Every structure is written in C-alpha cells, then in structure tokens.
C-alpha cells in the first residue's frame, strides 16, 4: 500500500441526469481556495465526456481512456512527489434510462496495471452503484438518503482501487489492430503563453474520403479541442495537489461509441521554451491498404518528425498521402466555427 500523499485518486459517478457524485482521496492540508477548486473538479473532468449529438451525429461517444506523460519544469525535484503514471479511465453503462459514467483520475509513482483497474471499475464498482441506487430508490423517499448510500459505495470503490495500486503493469494478449489516420493535430505553446497555436490537417474539404470517414469520429471539432482540454485538466489537478514542478502532456486518448473506436496518439518536444506536440487521429481498419498501419508505425514517425529526422511534409505523405498541407486553425472560436461549418459538414 502507498502512503496517501504518494498518489492522487478520484472516483466520480454521473447518472443519466448528469448529477455527479464524487470521492477524492487526499492527505495534504489544502487552502480553502484549493478545496473549492477540488469541489468543481469532477464537473470539469466530465465536461466533454458527454459528447453531444450535435457533434456525434446521434452516436453516444464516450471517453474510455486518457494517459499523460509528465516532465519536470526544472531540475529541482527535491520537494516534488515523483509521479510516473497519470491516467483517466471511464466506464459507461447504457440502460433504458440513458448512459451512466464512472470516471477515475489516478496519478501514481508506479506504472500501474490499467487493465486490472478498469476491469474492477467496469465489472464491479459501476454495476454495484447502479444496483444500490435502484434498490434504495424503491425503498426510500428521500433522494438525500440515496446519495448517502451512493457515497458509501464510492468510498468502497475508491478503497478497492487504492488497494490495487502498485501492481506491476502486465502484458495482456490482445488482437493487434491496424489503423487508418483521418487527421493530424499540431499544437504549439510557449511557457509564457506568447505562442499559442492549434491546427489540424486532413483531407481536402471536397475529398469524398473526408465525408466517408465523418461517421467514424465524433467530429473534427471535438477531436481538435479534446487533447488540449484534458492536458489542461491534468495540469490543474497536479496544481491543486501542489505538484507544481511537473507538466503533463497527452500521450494517448481512446474514445468509443457502440462498435466504433477512435485512438489518438501524441508525441511532443520542447525547444527554446516552446512545446510542440503532434498527434494522429486513428480509426481501426481491417481492409489492407498502404495507409493502414499499426500503432508503432505512427508513434515511430511522430517521434522521427519531432526529432528532425523527417520533414513535416514527408511525415504527412507517410501518414496519409491523401491529406493536403492546408492548415485549419483551431485557436479561436471563429476558426473552430469554420471547422464545424466546413470540415464537419457531410453533405
């Protein structure tokens, strides 16, 4: 078992009406301001989990998994907890009443066994929460009492996850999927925020391939804002717990809808206090094609491009030669509206 200040652990349950119940473990004495920030944290994490039908074209897209890497702001790490594994897991259950979500935030000094933790969330904690809620709603008139029972189950759930922390990450056999890239996201940001750019590259707006693959993702609008949002949320969480000497960077995001899946992979580099990140939006594909590759292909070429071993133009050709070099800005609301109006238009 860890000492409590060795990790961050939160478990949030959202019902069909988006009412959120939470349990967050911490041991440090937080200021009143930090406590207030902590109280609204679950709401902020759940924000884009419920990807609306306006962007998802009637599919219920939900986040499955987010993983971040951490880097030190300075070399002075004496007063900083050494956090190695930072990730979010989300279990969704669809009932006749709607979708419920069980979301976790976990930061640990170890490379945790994510599959083991997710299985506990999806197969035990989440179903028990639904069962308890259903049982006590029938017996009790007071919604406050139902909340008390849900709070108790969340506490049991978070204790179960806490007990699981520190388990070595195992290699699980799984079918090695191959993926087709439908977009490349570019992000540049300086430490003083004087540089702040967000762009996406994809098919030409008139290319039939763009329209064909719109059903395979929530939308280009959602994909382009998702990465920066959750990176910001991870940094906010670290700041609340006074882990101020580390910065997070998105490494991987997985979202799904029924039998659909989207995988986002990202790599970054820093030069002259400017952080450059490039990520690929991938969809699984079974049919053979020169553009259908495994995960390692995309990760390797992202790294090669960031390290200067291949040009950005050649990187785009390698990833998908059907892409154009037209840059779609996504920094301002006006640019995002343009992406919605043009890139996300199917007709």
Image: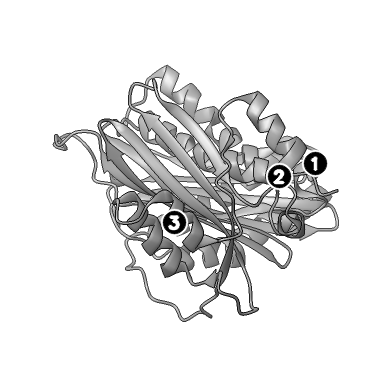
Residue 244 vs 107, above or below: the answer is above
In front: 28, or 76? 76
Mark 1: few/some/many CA within 10 Å (<14, 14-19, 20+): few
- The local secondary structure at tag 1 comes to helix
Residue marked by disc 2: 51
| Residue underneath mark 1 | 54
**Nearer the viewer's eye, disc 1 or disc 2?**
1
Residue at 65% over, 52% down: 203
Q: Nearer the viewer, residue 292 or 246?
A: 292
Residue 270 vs 194, above or below: the answer is below
- Do callouts 3 and 1 mark residues in contact (Cβ within 8 Å)? no
Position of residue 255 in the picture relative to residue 4 (left or right): right
Q: Secondary structure at mark 3?
A: helix
From mark 3 to mark 1, how far is it between C-alphas? Answer: 32 Å
Q: Earlier in the sequence, mark 3 or mark 2?
A: 2
Note whether residue 5 is visible. no
Give the mark, 3 or 1, whose residue is nearer the N terminus. Answer: 1
Query: What residue sits 24% from the left and 34% below the top?
Result: 73
Answer left or right for 4 relative to 337.
left
Q: CA distance from mark 3 to mark 2?
A: 30 Å
Q: Position of residue 302 (x, y in %)?
A: 40, 56
Residue 155 location (% of width, % of height): 52, 48
Across and down, in percent, residue 296 comes to 41, 69
| Depth check, front residue: 280 or 141 | 280
Residue that numbered label 3 is attached to = 315
CA gap, disc 1 and disc 2: 8 Å
Of labels 3 and 2, the one closer to you = 3
Q: Position of residue 45 (x, y in %)?
A: 56, 39
Q: Secondary structure at mark 2?
A: loop
Residue 119 tag number: none
């Amino acid at each position: 078992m860890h000492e409590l200040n060795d990790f961050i652990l939160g478990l949030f349950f959202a019902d069909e009406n988006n009412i959120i119940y939470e349990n967050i473990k911490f041991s440090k004495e937080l200021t009143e301001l930090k406590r207030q920030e902590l109280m609204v944290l679950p709401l902020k994490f759940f924000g884009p989990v419920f990807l609306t039908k306006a962007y998802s074209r009637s599919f219920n897209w939900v986040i499955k998994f987010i993983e971040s890497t951490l880097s030190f702001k300075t070399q002075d790490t004496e007063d900083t907890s050494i956090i190695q594994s930072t990730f979010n897991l989300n279990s969704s259950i669809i009932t006749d009443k709607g979708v419920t979500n069980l979301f976790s935030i976990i930061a640990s000094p170890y490379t945790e066994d994510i599959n083991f933790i997710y299985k506990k969330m999806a197969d035990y904690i989440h179903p028990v929460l639904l069962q308890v809620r259903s049982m006590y709603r029938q017996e009790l008139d007071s919604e406050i009492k139902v909340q008390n029972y849900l709070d108790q189950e969340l506490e049991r759930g978070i204790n179960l996850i806490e007990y699981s922390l520190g388990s070595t990450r195992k290699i699980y056999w799984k079918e090695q999927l191959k993926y087709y890239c439908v977009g490349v996201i570019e992000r540049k940001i300086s430490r003083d925020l004087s540089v702040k750019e967000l762009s996406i590259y994809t098919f030409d707006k008139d290319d039939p391939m763009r329209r064909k693959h719109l059903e395979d993702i929530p939308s280009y609008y959602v994909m382009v804002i998702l990465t920066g949002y959750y990176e910001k949320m991870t940094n906010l969480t670290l700041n609340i717990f006074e882990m101020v000497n580390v910065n997070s960077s998105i490494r991987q995001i997985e979202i799904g809808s029924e039998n659909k899946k989207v995988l986002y992979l990202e790599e970054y580099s820093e030069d002259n206090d400017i952080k450059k990140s490039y990520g690929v939006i991938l969809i699984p594909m079974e049919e053979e094609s020169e553009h259908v590759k495994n995960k390692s292909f995309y990760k390797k070429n992202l790294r090669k491009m960031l390290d200067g071993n291949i040009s950005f133009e050649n990187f785009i050709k390698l990833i998908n030669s059907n892409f154009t070099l037209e840059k779609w800005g996504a920094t301002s609301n006006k640019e995002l509206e343009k992406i919605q109006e043009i890139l996300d238009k199917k007709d």
